[in-house]
Amino acid sequence: VQSYNNKLIHTTVLLKIFSIMESKKYFAVNEILNKEISQIKNKIMLSMNGICAEKMQNSGFNYGKNFGVSWDRLCEIASAYEQHWDLAKRLWNIDIRETKLIATKICSPEMLNEKNIYEWISGINNSELAEITSILFAKNITLTHKYIELLHDTNFYIRLSMLHTLSKIGMNLNEKEIEEIIKSINISDTDNISAARAIESILLTADIKGQKEITTEFTKILSQTKTTYSEYICKSLNY
C-alpha cells in the first residue's frame, strides 16, 4: 500500500509539473486533442531517465523541463499518432523537451508557410531543437527562400536550424540558391561544431554541383579567420 501511495504521489507531482510548464498561449478547448496530449504526457513520464536529463541540463540544454527520454523512444511514441497540425502546435507550445520533440514528428510539414514558421522558430533555443526542427523544415522545400532569409536572423539557434535544413536539401538547390546561402553564412557560426558541420555539408554539396569558385572564395575568407572550426572546414574542402 505504501509503495502504491508513493507511486501515486510521484505521478501527481509530475502531472503538476506538466501543468506548470504549459505555455501561456491559449488554444480552443478540444477534448480529443487534450486526451491525446494527456496520453503522450503519461508515456513520457513512464519513459523518463533522470540521469540523462541531469547530464543534458549540466551541458547547457535550455528547457523548462527535461525528462531525459531518448530520441528513439520519442519517435516510437510519436509513431502512434497521425500527422496533425493542431496537436503538434499544442505540444510545441508546452515548455517541455519531450513534447517539443514529439511535435516535430507529428507536424504536417506541408502546413508550414512563411507566416506560421515563426511560431516554430521562436521556440528554438538550443542546438538539439535546432537540429531536430531542421528535419521537419527540410520536408517542405517550398520555403527554401525563407530558410535562406533566416540565415540573417540575430538568433544563433535559428541560424543553426536553417543551416541544417539547407544542408539536408542541398541537392535540391539550384546554383543561385547555393550561392546566396554561402554568401549569407555568418563566419562567426563556425565557432560552433554543429554549425560547422552543416556549413561543411553545404560547401561540399556546392563542390559536387560544380560551384567550386564560390566555395574557394568562401574558404579563402574563412582561412583568414581564427574561429574554432575554420581550419577543420578548410581542410575538408582541400583548401
Image: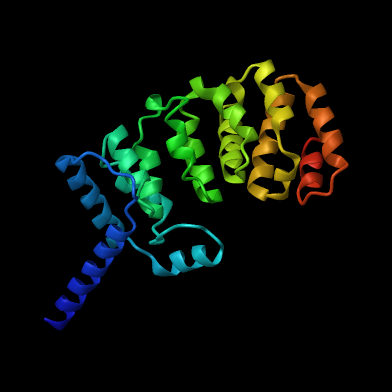
Give the quadrant of the N terminus. bottom left
How far across and how far down the image is residue 185, in percent? Answer: 70, 34
Say if 205 sits above or below 17 in the image. Answer: above
- How many marks overall? 0
| Residue 119, horizontal then vertical, whole percent | 43, 37
Which residue is drawn at the image coordinates 39% and 47% (left, top)? Answer: 100
**Eyeballing the image, is 117 above or below 123?**
above
Q: Residue at x 15, y 42 (%)?
A: 31
Q: Quadrant of residue 91?
A: top left
Quadrant of image for the C terminus: top right
Say left or right for 1 vs 210: left
Residue 83 visible at all: no
Q: Which image quarter: residue 26?
A: top left
Residue appearing at x 24%, y 57% in the figure:
42
Q: Does residue 90 appear left or right of residue 163 in this picture?
A: left
Q: Nearer the viewer, residue 216 or 25?
A: 25
Does residue 34 appear in the picture of this structure?
yes
Image x and y of residue 103, in percent: 36, 42
Q: Is residue 180 left or right of residue 223?
A: left
Q: Nearer the viewer, residue 212 or 156?
A: 156
Residue 155 horizontal side relative to residue 120, left or right: right
Query: Could you say which is closer to the camera, residue 165 or residue 150?
Result: 150
Q: Residue furthest left?
A: 1
Would you identify the image quadrant in which residue 234 lies? top right
x and y percentages locating residue 133 in the rendered image: 48, 40
- Residue at the image position 40 percent from the left and 47 percent from the top: 101
